[in-house]
Amino acid sequence: MNNVLAINSCTVGKSQMCCFDHLTQEEIDLVEANMVEVKYSKGETICKQGSFASHIMMITEGLAKVFLEGGNDILILKILPAVNMIGLTSLMEGNLVFQYSAQAYLPTTVKLIDINTFKQLLNNNGKFASSVLSIFAENSVITYGRFFCLTKKQTYGRLADILLCLAQRIYKMDQFPLQLTRKELAELSSMSVESITRILTKFKEDKLIRIDPDHIEILDAERLIKISQTG
């Protein structure tokens, strides 16, 4: 993996499960007694914006997108690989519903923790609560970066941002499987499928990336980072 890291904005990069390291054995037993595991197929809805929020969700395998819905339009806030959580905004006082939707990009396994159990842990364990607060802060930073990318960067910069994010934060390797369709890449970068295809071809011709039917490989991360930063 190239040592040059981009400042990109598509996903939370660190494991969010570390907050559970602060639980006592008794608290771990409480979580396990109030948790179920659910497997979602590609394209299946994990949670729906506006629906009753009864659980905090932990992705243990797979890849999901988190997005806002408005009419026929959606805005992707971030994409989440394994060891990330969904539904933390439902912890707001007086809030009873999910503030966004989530959908599986790939077959995804999720553990659902009863939200009242989760709140009990927050009230009783200060280190756990502090760690969850840190996760909230990281989510906010990612969302701010995402808005900047979509509103201030040109099309080349937006796609470079997504490709670097997939390589460095999702798959953690320069060569990664092409599991997202052109339509899904277009959705992530707020572009048309035609623009995605055109820019991918240009990146390939400029020897920034290599594409085969099953994989994309980043050939020149430094140049892609410059495009991401100036695009």
Image (tube, rainbow, N blue to C red):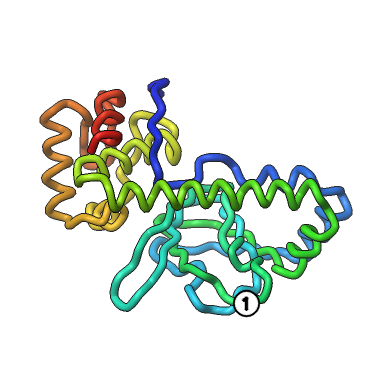
What residue is at 42 percent from the left and 20 percent from the top? Answer: 3
What residue is at 76 percent from the left and 66 percent from the top? Answer: 34
Which quadrant of the figure contains the N terminus?
top left
- Residue in front for this viewpoint, 7 or 187: 7
* Residue furthest right as drawn: 26
- Residue in front for this viewpoint, 22 or 226: 226
Indicate left or right for 79 with 114 as reference. Answer: left
Q: Residue 38 appears at what percent x and percent y?
A: 58, 64
Name the kind of residue labelled 1 in the image: Leu
What residue is at 75 percent from the left and 64 percent from the top? Answer: 119
Mark 1, residue position: 96
Q: Residue 180 appears at what percent x and percent y?
A: 31, 51
* Residue furthest top as drawn: 3
Give residue 43's quadrant in the image. Answer: bottom left
Q: Residue 146 appears at what percent x and percent y?
A: 38, 50
Considering only vertical position in the picture, is 104 above or below 202?
below
Element type at marker 1? loop
Regarding residue 60, the answer to whether it shows in the image is no
What residue is at 59 percent from the left and 79 percent from the top? Answer: 52
Indicate left or right for 68 with 224 as reference. Answer: right
How many neighbours does mark 1 have within 10 angstroms: few (below 14), some (14-19), or many (20 or more)? some
Please tell me how many numbered marks the rendered image carries. 1
Indicate left or right for 17 with 163 as reference. Answer: right
Which quadrant of the figure contains the C terminus?
top left
Indicate left or right for 209 with 74 as reference. Answer: left
Regarding residue 100, the answer to whether it shows in the image is yes
Give residue 15's quadrant in the image. Answer: top right
